[in-house]
Amino acid sequence: MRISPRVYGGLMAVLFAAPAWAGHEGENPNPTDAWNHTWTEVLIDLWVIGIIFGGIGLFMLWRYRAKSPGDVGQAKKLSLGAVLAWSLVPSAIFLADDFLLSAKGWSLWNIQRTVPKNAMEIKVTGSQWAFGYEYPNGVEISSTDRDEDADLFSQTVMEGDMVVPVGQPIVLRMGATDVIHSFGLTDYRLKEDMMPGRITYLWFIAKEPRVSQVVCVEYCGTSHAQMFNRVVSVPRADYEKWLAAKKAEAALPLIKVAKGPSMDVGSLAVGRLVAAKKN
Ligand SMILES: [Cu+2]
């Protein structure tokens, strides 16, 4: 079977036009959009390549099928040019597309690693088995503040949520106190390890009010599956109100709620809550 240069040209054009169909180039530096965009391109290219090569394979199966039980068939002698073309052209198509996607992945990685100058920093600490957050004004939140029977799909802010303002780039500076954890913010297509003795970071920006789940995505011990909480993005005015309320709550005198030599972060938070309700 001969495939004319025109057909090859057409196939390549379809393959390389695919990224353009997938969206617009470089108009928005929001990493979440960029990750979604690149993933769409990869999927489109996989489909295009799959259909082209699968189609050629199926055509060959049909074209050169055995026509009777004794039909053995004979390999046609190919010229050197045909052998080279059949090996190199498909490889070149694959490789060129791989290089194109790698280059786009590289530019996306640069977006993800370059924190905007106006980003607000939140310190995040992973420990068995909780995420702790510290805001620039000293407010501290822990995922253990969450009620055990809390509705995780609730659309309102609850205890233990990390709350961020919409439209504000947020950079998370992350570490761990014990073993390796990993901060998985799947709605934003983000994941970064949290390690003892090393500070890692990632940044994101919420485009609209929404509730997103954070999960630990590095197995970190018995209660790894309990290590999750929520990132809730709200309009800036609501964020300021929430932050001020948290600041006021933190200033309340602590009352002892746990007997024994030490209180964990959860009991401290409960202590503040109890004090807040009394006032
Ligand atoms: Cu963990």
Image (cartoon, grey):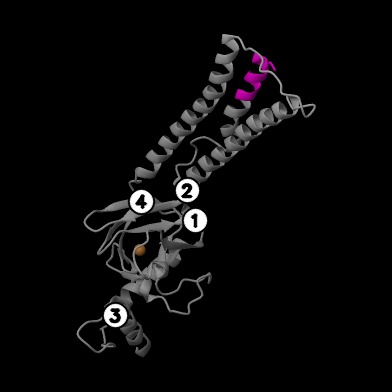
| Magenta span | 1-12
Residue closer to the observer: 188 or 223: 223
Q: Distance between the residues labelled 3 and 1?
A: 30 Å
Asked whether the residues under the numbered discs 3 and 4 touch, taking CB atoms below 8 Å apart as contact, a structural biologist would say no
Which badge, 3 or 1, comes first in the chain's sequence? Answer: 1
Q: Name the residue under label 2.
A: 32
Is any atom of residue 133 visible in this view?
A: yes
Q: How far apart are marks 3 and 2 (CA)?
A: 35 Å
Q: What residue type is labelled 3?
A: Leu
Asked whether the residues under the numbered discs 4 and 1 touch, taking CB atoms below 8 Å apart as contact, a structural biologist would say no
| Label 3 environment density (alpha carbons within 10 Å; few <14, some 14–19, many ≥20) | some
Q: How far apart are marks 2 and 1 (CA)?
A: 8 Å
Residue closer to the observer: 64 or 110: 64
Query: Residue 60: horizontal and vertical position, in percent?
Result: 70, 26
Which badge, 3 or 2, comes first in the chain's sequence? Answer: 2
**Which disc number belongs to residue 202?**
4
Asked if residue 141 is positioned above or below residue 91 in the image, the reply reads below
Q: What residue type is labelled 2?
A: Thr
